Image (cartoon, rainbow, N blue to C red):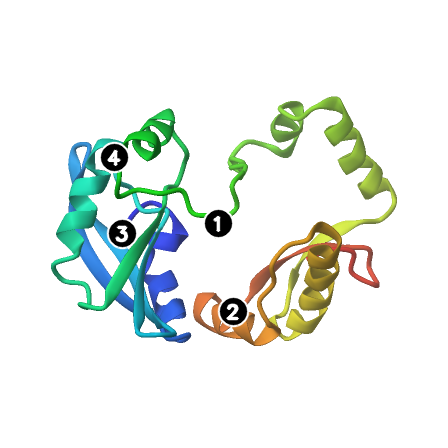
Amino acid sequence: MGGNFLQSEFWGKFKEKFGWKVFNSHEPHEKHEQSLQILYRRLPFHIGMAYIPWGEIEPDDIVRVLNEIRGFLPKDTTFVRYDPPELKETYSLLLSTSYFLKKAPADVQPPDTVILDLRPSEEDILKQMKPKGRYNIRLAGRHGVQVRDADPTELPVFYSLFTETCKRDGIAQHTQQYYQPLIDIFTPEIRSSPSHISPPLAG
């Protein structure tokens, strides 16, 4: 699979619990061959949807790959949604010149993400941050905010905090039942977020 969790076997098994079917296509990528994970489900009115979340496809190969995977997807597949792992200028050019490719009206995956390398020491990580970020983190520590591992039984606590965040920031939200299988499959112990001893502040 690709080098991200949305292309992992784990994610495929999780989505299968919610009615998605998983297909795999072997595609060349740079100097190696990788397996491209494709999710499929039927929508109302006999419409079939295929979805490739964060699959590694070179921009120049997108049209070719989409044409090739049509050969093994169900015949009622009406459209394929592809969310690239990162946006490149080439995609904008493709969208402006291709008759077959259109920008989706809404984002499914976060349009902006930050990858933080946790291998350096805590001090080295803090040095890479802006002064205001370092100040807020240290201020939280002085006020007793801690990060701890949470027991899976604390999912309702996390979900309550998550609901508050979604309402405040206008984020689309799944039901709590959606996240329980995610915990069951992924690990017996999940990483929680800052808590102020009691009550928790974030999840």
- Disc with the residue nearer the chain's start (2 vs 4): 4
- Asked if residue 126 can be seen in this view, the reply is yes
Residue 109 badge: 1
The answer for how far apart the CA atoms under marks 2 and 4 are is 33 Å
Q: Quadrant of the C terminus?
A: bottom right
Residue under label 2: 183
**Lateral position of residue 9 relative to residue 199, left or right:** left
**Residue under label 3:** 1
Residue 173, image quadrant:
bottom right
Query: Does residue 135 appear left or right of residue 14 in this picture?
Result: right
- Foreground mark, 2 or 1, reads 1
Residue at image point 59% right, 32% down: 121
- Three-letter amino acid code at the position of disc 3: Met
Q: Position of residue 112 (x, y in %)?
A: 54, 38
Q: Alpha carbon of mark 1 to alpha carbon of mark 4: how far?
A: 19 Å
Q: In which quarter of the view is residue 180 placed?
A: bottom right
Q: Position of residue 161 (x, y in %)?
A: 73, 62
The amino acid type of the residue labelled 1 equals Gln
Which of the two labelled residues, at mark 4 and mark 3, occupies the earlier sequence position? 3
The residue at which mark 4 appears reads as 58
State which tag comes first along the sequence, 2 or 1: 1
SS at mark 2 in the image? helix
Relative image position of residue 77 (x, y in whole percent):
25, 64
Q: Amino acid at mark 4?
A: Glu
Check if mark 4's residue and mark 3's residue have beta carbons within 8 Å: no
Of residues 32 and 86, the one nearer the viewer is 86
Residue 46, compared with residue 196, is above or below; it is below
Marks 2 and 1 sit apart, C-alpha to C-alpha, by 20 Å
- N-term mark: 2 or 3: 3
